[in-house]
Each structure stands twice: as structure tokens, then as C-alpha cells.
Image (cartoon, rainbow, N blue to C red):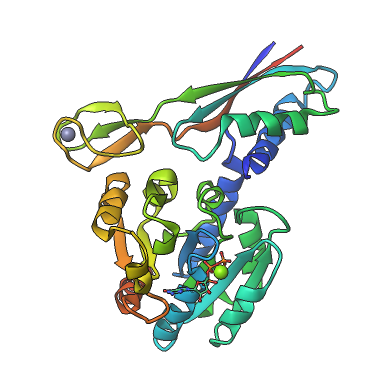
Amino acid sequence: MHEMALMAGVFEIISRYTADFPEKRVTKVTLVVGEMTNAVPEALEAAFEVYANSTNVEGAELVIKEIPLLARCTECGREGRIEKHMFVCPACSSLSMEIKSGRELYVDSLEVD
Amino acid sequence: MEINVNTGILSANDRIAAENKEQFSGHGLLVINIMGSPGAGKTTVLEKTIDILAGSLKLAVIEGDIYTSKDARRIEKHGVPVKQINTGGACHLDAKMVAKALKDFDLDARQLLIIENVGNLVCPVEFNLGEDLKIAVLSITEGDDKPMKYPLLFRESQAVIINKVDLLDFTDVDMDSLKRDIRKINSNIEIFEVSARTGQGIGEWAAWLGQKVNEKKG
Ligand SMILES: Nc1nc2c(ncn2[C@@H]2O[C@H](COP(=O)(O)OP(=O)(O)OP(=O)(O)O)[C@@H](O)[C@H]2O)c(=O)[nH]1
Ligand SMILES: [Mg+2]
Ligand SMILES: [Zn+2]
């Protein structure tokens, strides 16, 4: 699936951020992945192994911080977790729900040694 | 040593998508990105839509496919400029592929660019191309659980075309509950019930799209 393409993006970012210290090894990569993205953590892990192989990232720990899908009702203001991707306000039944978190997809930090 | 990165994984794609978008806007061109399962009827809907709109609007089409150019050849027969992109294995189009394909069109002479993405309910959604509208095509023969199983496409789309309604009697799809589920994912989405086989509903969809083209032209 497209996790390989996403991981290509991750490794582009890693090489950009480590360009100044080519002699160092990357020991940890932290990603932030929202619940409502089409990125499956297990598939990201598998893709990470493939890309890290024989590079200065090989052996690094991959940490994936998952962010829950939260939305806010624009009618009554209630904010909470969205279950099963149903954007229905549990307080007032409105369908007008704004996503507050859960769409994140970014490289948070690296550790180099 | 820790390095704070805080950079979007899709930021390289998003940057090129923004450049594409700027180029489209400069030409007053409306661009739509059509997504859905393999076989949902994207190309067939497109063929019928072209037949309605080609008389009044200047169209162009980009066809995304993993390996073949079958869909582009179908579109060509309708007298519209079309460019095939073969992703060579990738399950989605990305902004760079589209940027490259754009060079083959005279965009000033076009008003509506339709991009048919690779048949897939999951992967294309996250890759912005610079389009104005994302359009989902869902055929009822896929079953009415698809929006709940693949919600992101429906959340991100401005319209969904429910296709193959001519087959409704042969399925166990409950159309009202299907539409209700889609609205729970995205209450603002336009829903069109169509049959690209019989032409039912295609007129309403094409009229809505024509309206969007006019709004973009300003
Ligand atoms: N009965 C019926 N068949 C349809 C309809 N629309 C499309 N089909 C058929 O469904 C099949 C797939 O249609 P396509 O238009 O090629 O589907 P697609 O989504 O473009 O497929 P890919 O590009 O391969 O992902 C073809 O055999 C079409 O004739 C419809 O409204 N009703
Ligand atoms: Mg097709
Ligand atoms: Zn509410």
C-alpha cells in the first residue's frame, strides 16, 4: 500500500535533517500519526525496516505516537472522541462536527548518536 | 542528541500540489480528482459526463492507471484531450506526476480538468494533486458498508457519485441507510445517485459540476 510512499517521505526528511552530521547514526525516529489517516502503523513499521536497511538509520527505534480522532460540535460546542468515524454529536445529534485532532501525519523528532 | 523535526510526511507532495493549484487558478481552470474502487465506474461516469459537458465547456482529462492506457483510449474516443499517467506499481497519483502531465496541455484553452485516480479507496486520498474538488465514486455492487470501512475518502470529498443504481434490485443495498451513513461521515457532501449505464442522474451531476466550473471562472 501507500505506506511505502509515505516512508519515502519520512526518509527524505531524515536525510535533510541529518545532512550536517553524516558521521552520526540515527537511533530513534518519532512519528505522529492521527487515527483518521490512511496510514496503518504496522505497515509503516514494515516500510521503515525496508528503507532503513543498510543506511545510517538501520537498527533505529521507530516510535509511532497515535493521536485519537476528536471533533467539536459547531452547534452545541461539545468536544469529544469520534467513535467509528461517525461524526454525530452525542449531546445534540448535530452532524456538524469539526475535526480537532486525528489527521496528523508528521515526523516529530529524531535522535542521533 | 535529539533533533526537533516537526515536518509533515506529505509536505513535499503538498508543496508541489500548491504549485499545481496556483497554476490552475491562474488559468481559471476547475480541477477535480475522481477516486473510487477499481471497477466502480469512474471511467464510464466520466465518458457520460464528457458527452453532456463537451458541447459547452473545454475539457481535458488525465487518466491514472498502474500499467495500462485502456481508460485513456476510451476517453480519446469522445474527442477530448487526454493524457495517461502510468504509476508503474504505485497505488495512487501524486502531485509531481500531475505536474509533469500538465506540460502536455494548453491550460489556457481549457476550463475543466478531470483527473481519474488509480482505482483504490484508500491510498489516493492523502495525496493532494492541487485539485479544487475531490469526488468519490462508489458503486452499489461494492456493498453499502464501504463508507464506514473507508471513511476518509468520504470525509474529504465534496461529492459522492453512487453509481450502478440500475442494479439496485439485484443487491441488498438499502439506499436510505447508505446515504445516512455517508452523511454521518460528512454532512456537507453532495450525493448523486446515478447509473452510468442508463444515464440516470448523470444530468444532475453534470449540471452541478458545470456550475462549479462557472464559479471558478468568476
Ligand atoms: N450495470 C452497470 N454497470 C456499470 C455502470 N457503470 C459502469 N459499469 C460497468 O462497470 C465496469 C467497470 O467500469 P469502469 O468505468 O471501467 O470502472 P473504473 O472505476 O473506471 O475502473 P478502474 O479504472 O479499473 O478502477 C464496466 O464493465 C462498466 O461497463 C452502471 O451504472 N451500471
Ligand atoms: Mg477507469
Ligand atoms: Zn452538539
Q: How many marks?
A: 0
Q: Position of residue A113 (x, y in %)?
A: 77, 11
The C terminus of chain B appears in which quarter of the rendering?
A: bottom left
The N terminus of chain B appears in which quarter of the rendering?
A: top right
Is residue B65 shown above or below A89?
A: below
Quadrant of residue B217 within the rendered picture:
bottom left
**Can residue A77 be seen in the rendering of this structure?**
yes
Quadrant for ligand 3 reads top left
Q: Residue at x 36, y 54 (%)?
A: B144
Q: Residue at x 39, y 62 (%)?
A: B140
Q: Position of residue B197 (x, y in %)?
A: 42, 79
Q: Position of residue B165 (x, y in %)?
A: 35, 70
Looking at the image, which is closer to me, B13 or B118?
A: B118
Looking at the image, which is closer to me, A87 or B56?
A: A87
Residue B75 shown left or right of residue A73 in the figure: right
Is residue A5 shown above or below B178?
A: above
Q: Position of residue B211 (x, y in %)?
A: 31, 73
Residue B94 shown left or right of residue B162 in the figure: right
Quadrant of residue A57 within the rendered picture:
top right
Residue A50 shown left or right of residue B50 in the figure: right
Q: Residue at x 66, y 66 (%)?
A: B85
**Can residue B218 be seen in the rendering of this structure?**
no
